[in-house]
Image: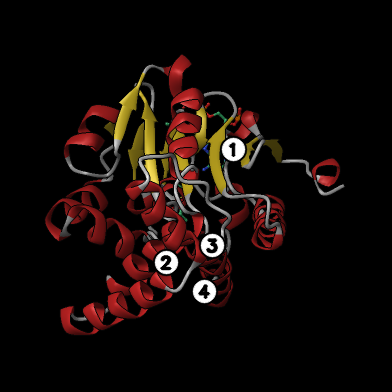
Amino acid sequence: KLAESLENTKVEQDGAIVVITMNRPKALNALNDQTLGELDRIFSCIETEAEVLGVIITGEGKGFVAGADISQMNGYGAEEGRNYANRAQTLFNKIEGLEKPVIAAVNGYALGGGCELSMSCDIRIASEKAVFGQPEVNLGLVPCFGGTQRLSRLVGTGIAKEMIFTARQIKADEAKAIGLVNKVVAPEALLDEAKAMMGGIISKAPMAVRYAKVAINKGVNMDLMNGLELEKDVAALAFASEDAKEGTAAFLAKRPAVFQNK
Ligand code: HXC
């Protein structure tokens, strides 16, 4: 029912994996209000669907997402700009905070808000055709869908500053070299690679993957000692799960584990 009402995004389910395709190719999938609203509804739905274990985001055509829709921002003042940033940040926080793994399969231009969208995902796989950049200063703007914060956390402040100050676009290989993407693959292999990686992830104990995601995401904003406390907390939760009993028993019995997500 949700899928039928979407204009700028496409949602397909392949077993326990949902593939979201950004689908406004005539504007290189630039994010307008409609698209942000659709993504928000999709992620609200995925949060509560127990049978969905992983999400892949990709784009139709030459673009992954070529940024926020510039035609919409033209004429914004301080208050509208802040509200806009707040709206997108809230959505990207929701994607980052989803307690299921999310892979960005970056097929093409991932600029501005598109690079920021990919950084709110857990893992980035790039096609050889992918292009990354934070070109906001070209427009007299600053990255504000999380770019100044997530890019520096991923690649360090020096490289983040260079990318943001110069607005330079980088290709997939360079993105891999700086740690912005995990893997570069041929364009035609992109979705299969993303599905294969996600298939591997969701074959593990889903609850353990979830706790690990929470520990990493929250821990990155903590000092080491508090992060280690958090790690003990999630470890205790994992030890208490049925899946931990199954996983360890299966290893000792030399048989494959059958996880129940409990
Ligand atoms: C609106 C966009 C767009 C965008 C592309 N298009 N990017 N429309 N917002 N961000 C539209 C073009 O206007 C054009 O529409 C169509 O998509 C195809 O784009 P072309 O420019 O013709 O394609 P090409 O020559 O291949 O160049 C590709 C490109 C270029 C290098 C990606 O489109 C580009 O530089 N786009 C802008 C990228 C950008 O600055 N993004 C950051 C935005 S700011 P028509 O109708 O002419 O065919 C941002 C953060 C905002 O994301 C935070 C502050 C609030």
Could you tell me residue 240's position as x and y percent? 44, 74
When the figure is inspected, residue 122 is found, relative to residue 130, above or below; the finding is below
The part of the image, by quadrant, that contains residue 208 is bottom left
The yes-or-no answer for disc 4 within 8 Å of ligand 1 is no
Alpha-carbon span between mark 4 and mark 1: 22 Å
Seen at 69% across and 37% down, the residue is 13
Give the mark nearer the N terminus: 4 vs 2. 4
Q: Which residue is mark 1?
A: 29
Q: Which residue is mark 4?
A: 82
What element does badge 2 sit on?
A: helix
User: Any mark on residue 170, and which?
Assistant: none
Alpha-carbon span between mark 1 and mark 2: 32 Å
Q: Which residue is mark 3?
A: 98
Query: Disc 2 vs disc 3: Cβ atoms closer than 8 Å?
Result: no
Could you tell me residue 156's position as x and y percent? 16, 57
**Could you tell me if residue 145 is visible in this image?**
no
Q: Residues within 10 Å of mark 3 (few under 14, many from 20)?
A: many
When the figure is inspected, residue 197 is found, relative to residue 93, above or below; the finding is above
